[in-house]
């Protein structure tokens, strides 16, 4: 994969997605002038000797403590060591890489006082595969994601551990293995690296990118389940949705129509079907999934802005033309926008799984589907899809518990100096497990809907949906008699998570996070 040239402040969501998927970012050289100007401004502030928060004072509640010039390097090292207080399992490598790239783009905008050499080390670590081991728990999402970013920064000064092409190594050894050396942080640099929302934003973006794949797969399996249940495509008529006026609903209905277009199964019951209306899990897909689409897009817009913003504190503004150098203290580190975006993604993910589980339950119930009980030719002797539906129900309930908004919580920290926090880190970090749960539900639906369509043979579904069934059948055959079903589920879930199901359908799907 070719590297992406990262233009600080102007990266697209597609750029961030590519970095998350493994593409290496390189900074646009045009940013170097602003970075150098910001570093020069910090040097001038230090030379004046006046107290400026984060440069020659303590931090948080200790902001009133003045630090001597001789101790400024120690001050920056100490903040990194003392703040590297995370716990729990390490962040996934892909998310840590994204966090590093987000921090790189923020610092490169020339408002943080970072020196070019320090910025270059962070960029080189990304390029050469030195990825810090960062415990995932310990941030409340205000005053920045201090603990996780401190663990990232610790590796830059030769402390902690990092993943490398040669395995997990102590920091100094990890850097040396790729020809790098630790940096001695100058005034403001430790705080600049620690302060910011990049941990929360990276996790929220990762959740968004995975939710995008989930959404697309769920549209496909929802259409397949509709055909499997001999459901009607009349509820997807564009006239219905134009009257409601919601963009997501209109696009979702259009996609479902495209997926079902030309289905012989659908054509077979256009006349003589006694059912007047389908259950909501089929009929209201455009309304529910469309609302999820709108919500995910709104979250994407927020995260796009956040990813391109500067969330450091204080911010450095070089003087000139009669203006004095300034270091302005504000609150850009407060991750409330990210917390809200993460909560929106969580709600959408929860509902995508919830609606799919209802379709699975409908398919396995002969009273609703008109199909053999639990989709097995010999119910009683065989249990068929009885327990996969139970598993789906369990996963949906787990996601309901996780979907409670994180942003409504707050707890004072730093001796009440930091008295309102966003909880964005927790809100964003819970997204990946939620998407994994919902992806498993969609994988189960894929199996159930494909099995249900088998009972309509020799009638087939649409060309798009038959391509999806063929993709599944490459690894999972029809279930005639009970067999060890866990491997079947794992194969189906892998197809959902990889994006292969949506790709197999080969129809235009609504974009969420850019092209």
Image: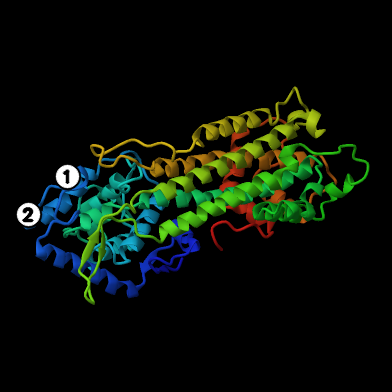
Q: Is residue 125 left or right of residue 181?
A: right
Chain-order first, disc 2 or disc 1: 1
Name, please, the residue furthest toward the front. Answer: 322
How would you rate the neighbour count of disc 1 (Cα within 10 Å): few for under 14, some for 14-19, many for 20 or more?
few
- Residue at 68 percent of width and 35 percent of height: 358
Residue 25, percent from left and from top: 39, 65
Which is nearer the eye, 189 or 46?
46
Measured in 3D between alpha carbons, the distance from the residue under mark 2 to the one under mark 1, in whole angstroms, is 14 Å
Name, please, the residue furthest toward the top. Answer: 380
Is residue 259 shown to the viewer in this render? no
Q: Quadrant of residue 446?
A: top right
Q: Which mark is residue 62?
A: 1
Q: Which mark is residue 439?
A: none
Q: Is residue 42 left or right of residue 24?
A: left
Secondary structure under tag 1 reads helix
Q: Is residue 12 left or right of residue 126?
A: right
Q: Which residue is mark 2?
A: 68
Q: Quadrant of residue 450?
A: top right
Which is nearer the eye, 408 or 268?
408
Is residue 64 shown to the viewer in this render? yes
- Residue at 45 percent of width and 49 percent of height: 204
Q: Quadrant of residue 480?
A: top right
Q: Is residue 500 above or below residue 490?
A: below
Residue 68, percent from left and from top: 7, 54
- Residue at 74 percent of width and 35 percent of height: 363
């Amino acid at each position: 994969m070719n590297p992406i040239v990262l233009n600080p402040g102007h990266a697209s969501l597609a750029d961030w997605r590519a970095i998350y998927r493994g593409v290496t970012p390189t900074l646009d050289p045009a940013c170097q002038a602003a970075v150098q100007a910001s570093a020069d401004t910090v040097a001038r502030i230090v030379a004046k000797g006046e107290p400026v928060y984060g440069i020659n004072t303590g931090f948080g509640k200790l902001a009133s403590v003045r630090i001597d010039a001789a101790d400024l390097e120690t001050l920056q090292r100490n903040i990194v060591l003392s703040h590297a207080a995370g716990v729990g399992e390490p962040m996934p490598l892909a998310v840590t890489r994204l966090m590093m790239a987000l921090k790189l783009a923020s610092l490169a905008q020339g408002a943080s006082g970072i020196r070019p050499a320090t910025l270059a080390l962070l960029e080189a670590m990304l390029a050469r595969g030195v990825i810090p081991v960062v415990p995932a728990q310990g941030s409340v999402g205000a005053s920045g994601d201090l603990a996780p970013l401190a663990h990232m920064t610790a590796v830059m000064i030769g402390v902690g551990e990092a993943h490398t092409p040669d395995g997990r190594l102590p920091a100094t050894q990890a850097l040396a293995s790729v020809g790098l050396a630790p940096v001695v942080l100058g005034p403001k640099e430790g705080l600049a690296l620690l302060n910011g929302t990049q941990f929360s934003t990276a996790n929220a973006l990762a959740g968004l990118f995975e939710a995008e794949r989930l959404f697309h797969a769920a549209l496909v399996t929802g259409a397949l389940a509709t055909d499997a249940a001999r459901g009607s495509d009349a509820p997807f008529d564009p006239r219905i949705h134009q009257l409601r006026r919601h963009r997501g609903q209109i696009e979702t209905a259009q996609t479902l129509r495209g997926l079902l277009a030309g289905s012989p199964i659908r054509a077979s019951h256009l006349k003589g079907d006694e059912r007047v209306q389908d259950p909501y899990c089929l009929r209201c897909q455009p309304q529910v999934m469309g609302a999820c689409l709108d919500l995910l897009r709104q979250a994407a817009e927020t995260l796009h802005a956040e990813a391109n913003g500067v969330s450091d504190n204080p911010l450095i503004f070089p003087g000139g033309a009669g203006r004095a150098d300034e270091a302005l203290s504000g609150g850009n580190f407060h991750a409330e926008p990210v917390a809200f975006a993460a909560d929106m993604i969580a709600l959408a993910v929860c509902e995508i799984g919830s609606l799919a589980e209802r379709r699975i339950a409908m398919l396995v119930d002969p009273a609703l589907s008109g199909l053999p009980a639990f989709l097995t030719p010999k119910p009683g002797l065989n249990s068929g899809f009885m327990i996969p539906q139970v598993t789906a129900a369990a996963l949906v309930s787990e996601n309901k518990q996780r979907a409670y908004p994180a942003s409504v919580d707050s707890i004072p920290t730093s001796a009440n100096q930091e008295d309102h926090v966003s909880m964005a880190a927790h809100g964003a970090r819970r997204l990946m497990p939620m998407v994994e749960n919902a992806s498993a539900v969609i994988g189960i639906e894929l199996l159930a809907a494909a099995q249900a369509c088998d009972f309509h043979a020799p009638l087939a579904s649409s060309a798009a949906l038959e391509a999806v069934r063929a993709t599944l059948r490459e690894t999972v055959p029809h279930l005639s008699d009970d067999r060890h079903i866990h491997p079947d589920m794992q194969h189906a879930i892998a197809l959902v998570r990889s994006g292969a199901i949506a790709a197999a359908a080969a129809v235009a799907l609504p974009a969420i996070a850019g092209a």
